[in-house]
Amino acid sequence: MGHKTYYQYYTNVNYLSCADCLAWHGKISTDPTRFPNRRDSCERKILALEHKDIKYSREKARRMRAAAKAELTRRELLSDAREALGNDNEEAIDLLAKAAKIDVYISEIERLTRENEEIFQSDETLRQRLCKLFAQSYSDKFGWPRYELLPEPMRFLREQAGIARIKQLLG
C-alpha cells in the first residue's frame, strides 16, 4: 500500500523575500500544484516529504511559519521606525531595537542612513545610540544557532566586517 507524498513550500527568510513567499513558507500540501508558481526573484523550493517524516515536518513547519511571521513583523517595525525618525526619535529607537532583536541587515542600515542623512548629520547623539544598538544587535546575531554552522573564523570575520560597516555609517 502506497503512502501519500507531501510537499512543503520553502523560501529563504530574509529581507529580500517577498511577503507572498513568506506567507507560504513552511506550508504543507499533498498537491504541489497548490503552491504558487511565482516568477519573481525570491529563492524558493517545493520540497518532497516522505510520509514517515510528516509528524516531524509539521513541527518544523510551525517553526518555519513562526520565522516568516517574525520577518514580516520586523519589516513592519522597521517601517514604523522610519516614519518616526525625525519626529519621535525615542519611539524610532524603541521600534528599531525591537526589529533588531528579530534580525538586522547591513543593507537596511545603509538604506536607513541614506534616507535620513540630514537627521543623522544634525543629531550626533541619535547617530551614536543607533550605532551602538545596531552594532550590538549585529554582533549578537552571530551567536544564533543558524550561524553556528559557519566555521568560527568565517563567522568572526563576517561579524567584524558588519560592525565596521555600521560604525562607518553611523559612527
Image: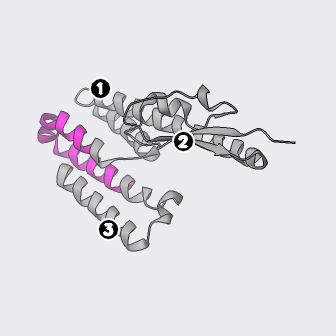
**Callouts 3 and 1 close, C-beta under 8 Å:** no
Pointer 1 residue: 83
The spot of residue 112 in percent (x, y) is 24, 38
Q: Disc 2 residue type? A: Ala
Pointer 2 residue: 67
Name the residue located 49 percent from the left edge and 28 percent from the top edge.
37
Tell me the distance, in whole angstroms, between the alpha carbons under discs 1 and 2.
25 Å
Query: Which of disc 1 and disc 3 is earlier in sequence?
Result: 1
Q: Say if the magenta span includes residue 117.
A: yes
Instruction: From this view, report whether residue 101 is shown above or below residue 116.
Output: below
Near mark 1 (Cα within 10 A), the count class, few <14, some 14-19 or many ≥20, is some
- Residue stretch rendered in magenta on the structure: 109-136
Q: Say if the magenta span includes residue 118.
A: yes
Residue 157's disc is: 3
Is residue 168 or residue 47 the one in the foreground? 47
Name the residue located 62 percent from the left edge and 39 percent from the top edge.
8
